[in-house]
Amino acid sequence: MGFLQRCVGRSRCLLLLEGQRSLGSLPSSDRGQQYSTGVAGLQERTLIAVKPDGVQRRLVGDVIKRFEKRGFKLVGLKLLQANEGILTEHYHELRRKPFYQEVIQYMTSGPVVAMVWEGYNVVKTSRAMVGETNPTEAKPGTIRGDFSIHVSRNVVHASDSVETAQREISLWFRSNELIDWDCCNHKIMYEH
Ligand code: UDP
Ligand code: MG
């Protein structure tokens, strides 16, 4: 079976429907489904997004590189201009915070790169890789600690729990935008 057939067979490798509808207005049945079956924990997924400041500063490659080198698997990726609808859902829990309006304005100010990464404990590990919300407190070696200075421009988003990740992935990706694929170094990463 050829590569294309394998992809289509898995039915998660279809054309992006970007721009046809607002993602924020999609019915839940049309949004990404979470967690294929498999060995517990290995298929945990999280949403990572390079925010507009990160895209403007050409940091997309640096962010991707860190997740690839750590060993996580990229299963979804897109550049998009997020609308207010998706962001109000995304940041729903922050709606009463004094900085809320500014965050929405900032996040709609330019394109973002949304990604879904998969792997063992990826939610917790990603938060450690990204660093504290406020770059002043983010340790060197973390993304925010290496690339940012001010809390209002902290380069990346990372889901903060497995439950939040499920909700956020479903918000930003349709199920046919997430691709299940076999990583050639899977055994080297996970088995001994
Ligand atoms: N934020 C801000 N000022 C603050 C706190 C947060 O501008 O005092 C922004 C910042 O971009 C942050 C986002 O709001 O990343 C979401 O805040 P949250 O507390 O969820 O932090 P995160 O999960 O991104 O670390
Ligand atoms: Mg958060």
Image (cartoon, rainbow, N blue to C red):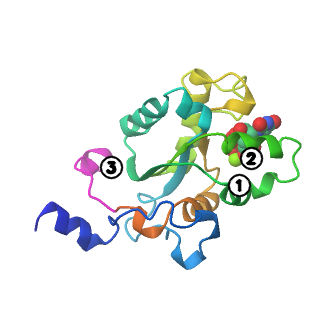
Magenta span: 180-192
Q: Residue at x 33, y 66 (%)?
A: 14
Query: Can residue 118 be seen?
Result: no
Q: Earlier in the sequence, mark 3 or mark 1?
A: 1
Mark 3: few/some/many CA within 10 Å (<14, 14-19, 20+) = few
Circle 1 Cα neighbour tier, 10 Å, few/some/many (<14 / 14–19 / ≥20): some
> Would you say the beta carbon of the disc 3 residue lies within 8 angstroms of ligand 1?
no
| Mark 2 nearby-residue class (10 Å; few <14, some 14–19, many ≥20) | many
Which of the 4 image quadrants contains residue 17?
Answer: bottom left
Amino acid of disc 2: Ile
Q: Secondary structure at mark 2?
A: helix
Q: Which numbered disc flags the more N-terminal residue, 1 or 2?
A: 1
- Which quadrant of the structure image shows residue 154? top right
Counting residues from the start of the chain, the first of labels 3 and 2 encountered is 2
Which dot marks residue 84? Answer: 1
Query: In the structure shown, which secondary structural element does the residue marked by tag 1 occupy?
Result: helix
Q: Is residue 98 visible?
A: yes
- Identified by mark 1, the residue type is Glu
- Residue 104 numbered mark, or none: 2
Q: Disc 3 versus disc 1: distance between alpha carbons?
A: 40 Å
Task: Dividing the image into four quarters, tell me where ligand 1 lies.
Answer: top right
